[in-house]
Image (tube, helix red, strand yellow):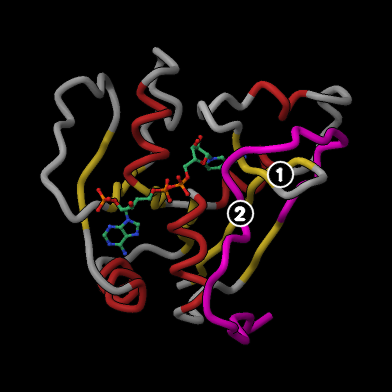
């Protein structure tokens, strides 16, 4: 099974503003960057609990009918997810990847800053696509906070 990251960050490396706003991702216009093709190729989305909480504020369920796994060490309430296919998992990234593989998934989309870093540190990410949005936002939630060095890539 392949595990991929596909995310957008500001030039100064932020995934989101401190209040979790993602408005800056539209800076410079919406030229094609391959996300639709990428998203069509994944059969499971793995997101961190904090990203899940932000996605819930969008109103419409962002992931359509795609299987979504929300990672958290605490019980989560999925009752407000309308029309989505959601479940919870927790544990070591390698164990999560092995379980998804055993269940027959072929391509997982790993998302959320802390979540991406944990999967990278575990060395289980096969492909990392980072889109740099041409804007500086000064402060926010970093993709690359301090974490252990790793030779994470297999490709
Ligand atoms: N620009 C982009 O492309 C992009 C993409 C994704 C997200 N974002 C933004 O990034 C922000 C969220 O990122 P974040 O770094 O704050 O957090 P995150 O990765 O979304 O969520 C972190 C939480 O996920 C849970 N978690 C992660 N790995 C786990 C594991 N292996 N086992 C159990 N639980 C695990 C933990 O939840 P518990 O504390 O509940 O245990 C952890 O606190 C949001 O503002 C979101 O909108 C931006």
Q: Quadrant of the C terminus?
A: bottom right
Q: CA distance from mark 1 to mark 2?
A: 8 Å
Q: Which residue is mark 1?
A: 9
Label 1: which secondary element: strand
Q: Which residue is mark 2?
A: 143
Within the magenta stretch, is there residue 149?
A: yes
> Residue 151: x, y in percent?
62, 87
Label 2: which secondary element: loop
Q: Residues within 10 Å of mark 1 (few under 14, many from 20)?
A: many
Q: Is mark 2 within 8 Å of ligand 1?
A: yes
Quick one: 56 or 97, which is closer to the camera? 56
Residue at 86% of width from left, 22% of height from top?
29
> Residue 62: x, y in percent?
45, 26
* SS assignment for the magenta stretch, majority: loop
> Residue 128: x, y in percent?
66, 64
Quick one: 28 or 138, which is closer to the camera? 138
Farthest front residue? 138
Residue at 59% of width from left, 81% of height from top?
152
Residue at 23% of width from left, 68% of height from top?
91
Marks counted in the figure total 2
> Residue 34: x, y in percent?
75, 43
- Image marks 1 and 2: residues in contact by CB distance under 8 Å: yes
Q: For residue 84, what is the image quadrant?
A: top left
Quick one: 80 or 135, which is closer to the camera? 135
What is the span of residues highlighted in magenta in the rendered image?
130-155
Q: For residue 102, what is the image quadrant?
A: bottom left
From this view, report whether residue 106 is shown above or below residue 41.
below
Q: Earlier in the sequence, mark 1 or mark 2?
A: 1
Q: Is mark 1 within 8 Å of ligand 1?
A: yes
């Amino acid at each position: 099974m392949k595990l991929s990251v596909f995310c957008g960050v500001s030039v100064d490396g932020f995934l989101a503003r401190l209040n979790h706003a993602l408005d800056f991702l539209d800076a410079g216009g919406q030229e094609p960057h391959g996300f639709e093709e990428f998203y069509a190729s994944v059969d499971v989305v793995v997101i961190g609990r904090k990203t899940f909480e932000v996605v819930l504020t969008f109103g419409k369920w962002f992931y359509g009918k795609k299987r979504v796994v929300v990672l958290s060490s605490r019980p989560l309430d999925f009752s407000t997810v309308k029309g989505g296919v959601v479940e919870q998992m927790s544990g070591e990234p390698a164990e999560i990847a092995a379980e998804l593989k055993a269940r027959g998934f072929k391509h997982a989309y790993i998302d959320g800053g802390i979540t991406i870093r944990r999967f990278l540190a575990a060395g289980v990410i096969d492909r990392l696509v980072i889109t740099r949005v041409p804007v500086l936002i000064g402060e926010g939630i970093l993709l690359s906070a301090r974490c252990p060095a790793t030779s994470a890539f297999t490709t």
